[in-house]
């Protein structure tokens, strides 16, 4: 029986304790924690509520028709590099659009941030032309919640495998996933160069856990939902537990257009379009926005009023600002024998030797490199075959047959500096399918970000050579025009003039409005933000619960 079958249903006129907007990485966690803490909760999710039976191994359906993600035909975006440029209508970002959110389709790399990610500006100094700053919380503040996320969700990994790991209060709940061919070769090449590869921590269960079936190594992982429920998104475990409290209702296909305020400037609920396109108002005593780092600022900007003419909770003028994508790069290698990387999960080995790149190289940044094979048959045929080989005809078909089963990638995941011009705003001309202003993305990488990315790509090429690759190639390191990680657009801080939310995720301007997702980030980390997003959600639930019980919301 599905979780929705016996779910509590609230009336629109009922003022629930908490209205949560977004049911993804953070919203799913907040829904369970707040409902288990005794509060009445309604969650509005703009996407559908799919089950494991709805998932498919159809590459075109998932990637080409946006089965699990935002559909640019209904939700167009525009893009420009600077505020002076004319924005052009084009796909500019992607996020999970369904109950469960991005973790339903993500690669499942599950890295903690390290201590440096929270205090880097204080340690290294400010960087001219950026909003580089320290977080108002530290790694130590978040460590118990990293541990809780790993044990509640189900994470496979090996404590102490990396000499660069931050302190941990508890080991991973599950052993690492079996190593793939790419992991063996990556390990061989990296160790030959003196590096320290280790089993990749992943939000995929390697053994039975919480009544869930372990990974069956089907090979359709990144970009696909898991039919087994082995991928540790909120969908198979956290959300059903929220519903089971009898205090939480999940409403899919609910597209929120505005957060409503009363005459005192307090949030009283949200107006949304339901699945039939009718407009509804759900009342609440407090509102938590967990819609992701792009939709959260967009909703605040859409919710402008006489009290907040520049957008809700935007007295700082920073709602939508300091968008960070994380940069990424790749080095490809073809080997003599078949690797069959299309099987099993995406990543089994990673290294953090360059988590902090030595300043002697002349630029800020750092990150990790992992071993993977990013492609499926259609995508590899489309752009995976290296450009120095024939791209059509019988020789192309021969190359495709040889390279698809023998190729692996060293993928770099790196920092992005916060720049005020990099932002989410409302487009002046383009509308979405609901008649609302489309999202306008303004983004231009800082030069240091591109240097960091190139540095990591070069290291990837060296690892492939040391591992014995017969052929090596890269995709050019170029300025970003599309984002997967949507971070920093409603940053956390103690000063209301330079941030949007405080350390409790409460907006400085509206005492009963909270924001908790990637938008809260002050720095980008090193390329894998999901565990930090979910750790923040567990922490926010504790903070919000304490405030509510003291009648301070």
Image (cartoon, rainbow, N blue to C red):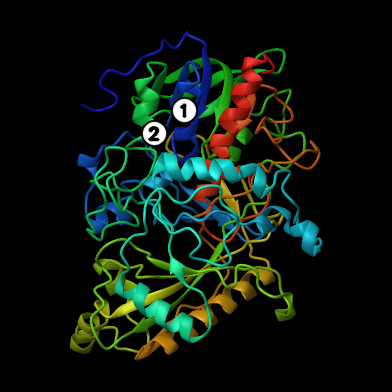
- SS of the residue under disc 2: helix
Looking at the picture, how far across and down is residue 378, in whole percent?
Answer: 26, 67
Tag nearer the camera, 2 or 1: 2
Q: Compared to 234, does 305 lie above or below? A: above
Distance (Cα) linking label 2 and label 1: 9 Å
**Nearer-the-camera pick, 349 or 440:** 349
Q: Compared to 411, does 420 lie above or below? A: above
Q: Mark 2 points at which residue?
A: 238
- SS of the residue under disc 1: helix
Q: Name the residue under label 1.
A: 31
Q: Compared to 274, does 25 lie above or below? A: below
Mark before the other along the chain sequence, 2 or 1: 1
Residue 230 visible somewhere in the drawing = yes
**Nearer-the-camera pick, 517 or 433:** 517
Looking at the image, the residue that sits furthest to the top is 13
Residue located at (30% from left, 68% from top): 379
Residue located at (62% from left, 16% from top): 549
**Nearer-the-camera pick, 216 or 82:** 216
**Nearer-the-camera pick, 304 or 32:** 32
Looking at the picture, how far across and down is residue 279, in whole percent?
Answer: 44, 20
Q: In which quarter of the image is residue 59?
A: bottom left
Residue located at (31% from left, 53% from top): 206
Assign the C terminus to one quadrant of the image. top right
Residue 438 visible somewhere in the drawing = no
Q: In which quarter of the image is residue 127?
A: bottom right
Residue located at (32% from left, 18% from top): 7
Looking at the picture, how far across and down is residue 446, in whole percent?
Answer: 68, 66
Q: In this view, does 422 lie to the left or right of 56?
A: right
Q: In this view, does 214 lie to the left or right of 87?
A: left
């Amino acid at each position: 029986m599905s979780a929705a079958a016996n779910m509590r249903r609230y009336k629109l006129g009922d003022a629930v304790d908490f209205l949560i907007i977004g049911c993804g990485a953070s919203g799913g966690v907040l829904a369970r924690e707040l409902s288990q803490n005794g509060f009445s909760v309604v969650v509005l999710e703009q996407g559908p509520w799919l089950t494991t039976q709805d998932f498919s191994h159809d590459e075109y359906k998932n990637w080409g028709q946006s089965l699990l993600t935002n559909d640019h035909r209904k939700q167009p975006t525009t893009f420009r590099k600077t505020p002076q440029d004319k924005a052009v209508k084009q796909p500019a970002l992607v996020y999970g659009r369904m109950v469960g959110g991005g973790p339903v389709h993500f690669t499942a790399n599950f890295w903690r941030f390290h201590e440096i990610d929270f205090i880097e500006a204080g340690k290294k100094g400010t960087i001219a032309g950026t909003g580089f700053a320290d977080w108002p919380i530290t790694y130590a503040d978040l460590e118990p919640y990293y541990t809780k996320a790993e044990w509640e969700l189900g994470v496979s990994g090996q404590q102490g495998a990396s000499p660069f790991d931050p302190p941990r209060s508890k080991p991973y709940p599950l052993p690492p996933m079996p190593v793939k061919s790419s992991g063996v070769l990556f390990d061989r090449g990296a160790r030959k160069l003196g590096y320290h590869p280790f089993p990749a921590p992943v939000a995929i269960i390697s053994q039975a856990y919480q009544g869930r079936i372990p990974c069956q190594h089907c090979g359709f992982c990144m970009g696909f939902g898991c039919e087994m429920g082995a991928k540790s998104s909120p969908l198979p475990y956290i959300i059903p537990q929220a519903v089971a409290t009898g205090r939480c209702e999940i409403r899919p296909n609910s597209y929120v257009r505005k957060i409503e305020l009363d005459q005192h400037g307090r949030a009283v609920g949200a107006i949304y379009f339901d699945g039939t396109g009718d407009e509804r108002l759900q009342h609440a005593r407090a509102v938590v926005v967990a819609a992701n780092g792009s939709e959260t600022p967009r909703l605040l900007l859409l919710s402008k009023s006489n009290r907040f003419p520049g957008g809700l909770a935007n007295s700082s003028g920073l709602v939508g600002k300091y968008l960070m994508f994380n940069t990424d790069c790749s080095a490809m290698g073809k080997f003599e024998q078949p690797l069959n990387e299309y099987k099993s999960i995406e990543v089994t080995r990673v290294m953090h030797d360059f988590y902090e790149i030595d300043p002697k190289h002349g630029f800020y940044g750092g990150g990790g490199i992992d071993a993977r094979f990013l492609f499926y048959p259609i995508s590899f045929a489309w752009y995976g075959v290296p450009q120095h080989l024939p791209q059509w005809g019988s020789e192309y078909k021969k190359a495709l047959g040889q390279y698809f089963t023998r190729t692996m990638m060293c993928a770099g995941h790196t920092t992005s500096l916060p720049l005020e011009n990099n932002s989410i705003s409302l487009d002046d001309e383009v509308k979405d399918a609901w008649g609302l202003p489309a999202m306008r993305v303004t983004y231009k990488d800082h030069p240091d970000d591109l240097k960091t990315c190139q540095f990591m790509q070069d290291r990837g090429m060296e690892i492939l050579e040391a591992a014995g690759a017969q052929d090596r190639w890269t995709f050019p390191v170029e300025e970003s025009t599309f984002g997967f990680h949507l971070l920093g657009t409603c940053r956390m801080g103690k000063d209301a003039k330079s941030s949007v939310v405080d350390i409790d995720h409460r907006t400085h301007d509206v005492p009963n409005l909270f924001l908790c997702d990637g938008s809260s980030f002050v720095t980008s980390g090193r390329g894998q933000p999901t565990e930090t997003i979910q750790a923040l959600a567990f922490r926010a639930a504790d903070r919000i619960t304490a405030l509510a019980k003291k009648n301070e919301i």
